[in-house]
Image (cartoon, helix red, strand yellow):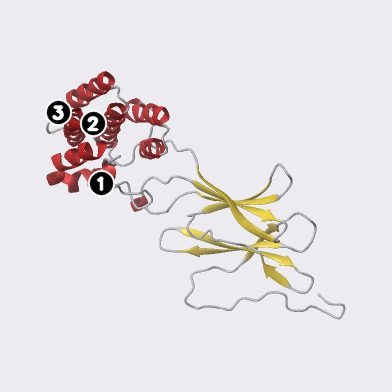
Amino acid sequence: GAADGYCLAWSEASDPTSTLALPRLLADVNLDGRQDVILSRAECGAHTCFEDLAVLTWDGTTLANRWDGSSLDLPYPEVRIVEATDGAPQVQVTGTGFGSVGAGPYRPVRRTWRWDAPSGRLRVAAEERLPSAYRIHLLQDAMAAESAGRTQDAADMYRRVMTDDQLLDWQDPASERANLGAFAAFRLVRLLLIAGEVNLAQGELDALQSGHPAGADGHAFAVMAAAFRESFAGAADPAAACDAARQAVEASAGDILRRLDFGYANPAPTLAELCPGS
């Protein structure tokens, strides 16, 4: 305010079509004692709420929004202000999950905004997928590790997907575990063959075929693994072997992909992504 009374520092237009709730003040943003706040408004759909955030700092004349980026993709977020090791304030927004069963098991995502003193703005500094106890999320981590060239980590995680009794499944635990375990076994066979570990790969393939016979959940992945092994033995060409593996199950691709669909909060693989050709 001024010496003779209050003056307008911030305004937002009313939108009758918006689902955003009224703003609420959470905290001082940069912990320097000046008048700066995080302004948060909830936006709720049929099942899930999100938070629209702004950072208002006093620039000597009025309040200005210093927030870069958006948090409107993080469901039911938890908002925390933390201090980095160098003392710079950070805002952590962690999505905790959708309210709809159709979303499937949610992998918590934490996005961190860091106060950037030279620009005087809060900017996205990091984003991380938090640990999850779900089997599908460990499988996703294994595939990401393989893509990044961390083959031993990937192999270890594939084996956990296949054998870990402590991992959580979603709606049909027995069927989901069988299919995810068989998919992980196929990816492990592929990984081992490409690495030249032929005997280990054959042992994993034998176990996959005996554990998932015709008519059983996951049998399609045993078919893919056998086709990959046969093609790879002839030319040692991962791309050609993946083509052979996909062609071997092309007629039942829809059913295979349906069994790997864990709701809209999780990426649904395509047939091509089941066996990347490199």
Query: Residue 172 location in percent, x, y?
Result: 27, 39
Check disc 3 and report the residue beneath it. Answer: 213
| Mark 2 surroundings within 10 Å by alpha-carbon count, few (fewer than 14), some (14 through 19), many (20 or more) | some
Would you say residue 245 is visible in this rendering? yes
Question: How many numbered callouts?
Answer: 3
Q: Quadrant of the N terminus?
A: bottom right
* Contact, mark 2 vs mark 3 (Cβ under 8 Å): no
Q: Is 173 or 259 nearer to us in this picture?
A: 259
Callout 1 amino acid: Ala
Check disc 1 and report the residue beneath it. Answer: 272
Q: Earlier in the sequence, mark 3 or mark 1?
A: 3
Secondary structure under tag 2 reads loop
Secondary structure under tag 3 reads loop
Task: Look at the picture and state if 129 lies above or below 116.
Answer: above
Query: Residue 256 location in percent, x, y?
Result: 21, 43
Residue 259 horizontal side relative to residue 250, left or right: right
Callout 2 amino acid: Ala
For the residues marked 2 and 3, what is the alpha-carbon distance in whole angstroms?
26 Å
Callout 3 amino acid: Pro
Check disc 2 and report the residue beneath it. Answer: 236
Residue 275 horizontal side relative to residue 93, left or right: left
For discs 1 and 2, the disc positioned in front in the rendered view: 2
For the residues marked 1 and 2, what is the alpha-carbon distance in whole angstroms?
19 Å
For discs 2 and 3, the disc positioned in front in the rendered view: 2
* Contact, mark 3 vs mark 1 (Cβ under 8 Å): no
Residue 32 horizontal side relative to residue 161, left or right: right
User: Based on the displayed image, in which of its 4 quarters is residue 141 positioned?
Assistant: top left
Q: Earlier in the sequence, mark 1 or mark 2?
A: 2
